[in-house]
């Protein structure tokens, strides 16, 4: 265990006060121990944990993460960050949730595409697939993001829009393409301008940006997601650790950040700020937009019990295939972020899940 910090508020709260005691130390130790044991056994190469409740913060690093500010590939935690950038244009009245995507991408037509609305892209009910059938070919050729967009516009729909829920990275990609066409800015630039800078997320980038690529924590690629190479040695030029993938900046999985920066992002939805999204927009993003019986989703966010945090509907956050997980709980004013290098499908239960459940129990 390399570093542990417990920060009290500027009001000088003592350890025995109710606020400082809100985090159950024994349960929180269990969360830390799960990550420590996983790193000691070499199951997890590197990990960082951030837990905040009120003004009490625990931020800790494990294994090859040299400090608590280490920067990881977030994978799908990228999605709500990118959609927050898109929603900044909603605040400017550049689009409405019910607008057809075709209004902004005229060539997005046929096969029922005309019925796909902007909100369908955000909540994974558009009918678009998660990954393109030609995903591996594109990555092997080091295709630019624009080619992924072109293929996503033409790829066959899997079902009629709004008829069912199916997780869709390509839906997020096309939402960000709409934002590019409206703003005239690449999604990485727009995200830096309207998300990272206002929230002072100085250790974050969609892609690499101004970060030192040599400082980024390397992912464990054995048992990685199939679309990321599954650890095959022939995929080294395009897997999670490749310069190509790190720099591509895909809005569905290509952001990098530290745990503290991810926590800043989540906290902006617990306590909306005037220099970020409008408060009503921020609240709308973390509310469920699906009917009963369908997997609950916010706008870009996952919501509800499936996150492994406190077991109620108001929890919001996201997980990532690289072994990342984050959630925030409005009821207890708490935030949890764990970033690891172990692919999500490499272990059951995954250390991130064990740490999340223990942290949820620590938040009384």
Image (spheres, rainbow, N blue to C red):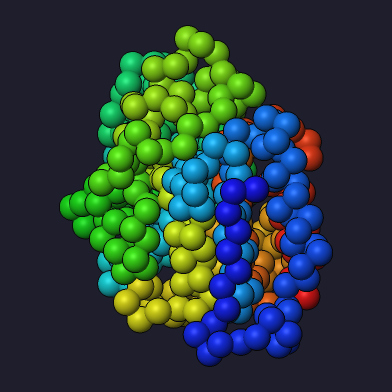
Residue 310 point in image, percent of width and height: 75, 66
Q: Which residue is painted at 51% across and 11% down in the image?
A: 233
Q: Which residue is painted at 46% across and 47% down in the image?
A: 70
From the viewer's perspective, tell me whether residue 215 is left or right of residue 298: left
Task: Determine the image quadrant of residue 35.
Answer: top right
Above or below, 342 against 57 in this view is above
Residue 260 point in image, percent of width and height: 49, 60
- Looking at the image, how many numbered discs can be counted on the residues? 0
- Considering every residue shown, the one lying at the far top of the view is 234
From the viewer's perspective, tell me whether residue 357 is left or right of residue 112: right
Task: Determine the image quadrant of residue 278.
Answer: bottom left
Q: Which residue is painted at 44% across and 16% down in the image?
A: 236
In the rendered image, the quadrant that contains the C terminus is: bottom right
- Considering every residue shown, the one lying at the far left of the view is 184
Above or below, 295 against 230 in this view is below
Task: Determine the image quadrant of residue 250.
Answer: top left
Q: Nearer the viewer, residue 355 or 326?
A: 355
Residue 26 point in image, percent of width and height: 81, 64
From the viewer's perspective, tell me whether residue 114 is left or right of residue 360: left
Q: Nearer the viewer, residue 223 or 292?
A: 223
Residue 192 point in image, percent of width and height: 29, 56
Task: Work out whether residue 265 can be spotted.
Answer: yes
Task: Work out whether residue 106 can be spotted.
Answer: no
Q: Which residue is painted at 37% across and 68% down in the image?
A: 199
């Amino acid at each position: 265990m390399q570093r542990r910090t417990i920060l009290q508020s500027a009001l000088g709260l003592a350890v025995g006060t109710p606020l400082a005691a809100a985090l159950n130390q024994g349960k929180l130790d269990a969360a830390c121990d799960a990550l420590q044991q996983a790193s000691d056994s070499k199951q997890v190469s590197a990990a960082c944990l951030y837990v905040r409740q009120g003004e009490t913060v625990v931020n800790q690093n494990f294994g090859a993460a040299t400090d608590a500010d280490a920067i990881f590939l977030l994978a799908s935690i990228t999605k709500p960050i990118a959609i927050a950038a898109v929603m900044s244009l909603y605040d400017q009245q550049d689009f409405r949730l019910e607008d057809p995507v075709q209004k902004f991408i005229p060539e997005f037509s046929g096969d029922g595409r005309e019925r796909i609305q902007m909100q369908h892209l955000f909540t994974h009910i558009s009918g678009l697939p998660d990954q393109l059938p030609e995903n591996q070919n594109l990555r092997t050729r080091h295709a630019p993001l624009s080619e992924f967009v072109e293929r996503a516009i033409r790829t066959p729909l899997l079902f009629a829009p709004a008829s069912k829920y199916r997780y869709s990275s390509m839906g997020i990609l096309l939402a960000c393409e709409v934002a590019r066409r409206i703003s005239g800015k690449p999604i990485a630039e727009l995200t830096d301008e309207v998300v990272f800078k206002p929230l002072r997320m100085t250790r974050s980038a969609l892609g690499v940006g101004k970060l030192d690529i040599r400082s980024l924590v390397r992912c464990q690629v054995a048992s990685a997601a199939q679309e990321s190479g599954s650890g095959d040695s022939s995929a080294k030029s395009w897997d999670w650790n490749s310069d190509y993938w790190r720099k591509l900046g895909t809005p569905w999985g290509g952001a990098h950040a530290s745990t503290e920066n991810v926590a800043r992002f989540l906290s902006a939805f617990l306590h909306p700020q005037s220099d970020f999204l409008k408060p009503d927009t921020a609240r709308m993003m973390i509310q469920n937009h699906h009917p009963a019986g369908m997997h609950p989703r916010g706008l870009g966010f996952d919501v509800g019990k499936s996150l492994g945090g406190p077991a109620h509907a108001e929890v919001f956050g996201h997980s990532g295939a690289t072994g990342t997980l984050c959630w925030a709980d409005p009821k207890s004013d708490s935030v949890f972020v764990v970033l690891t290098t172990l692919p999500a499908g490499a272990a059951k239960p995954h250390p991130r899940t064990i740490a999340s459940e223990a942290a949820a129990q620590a938040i009384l």
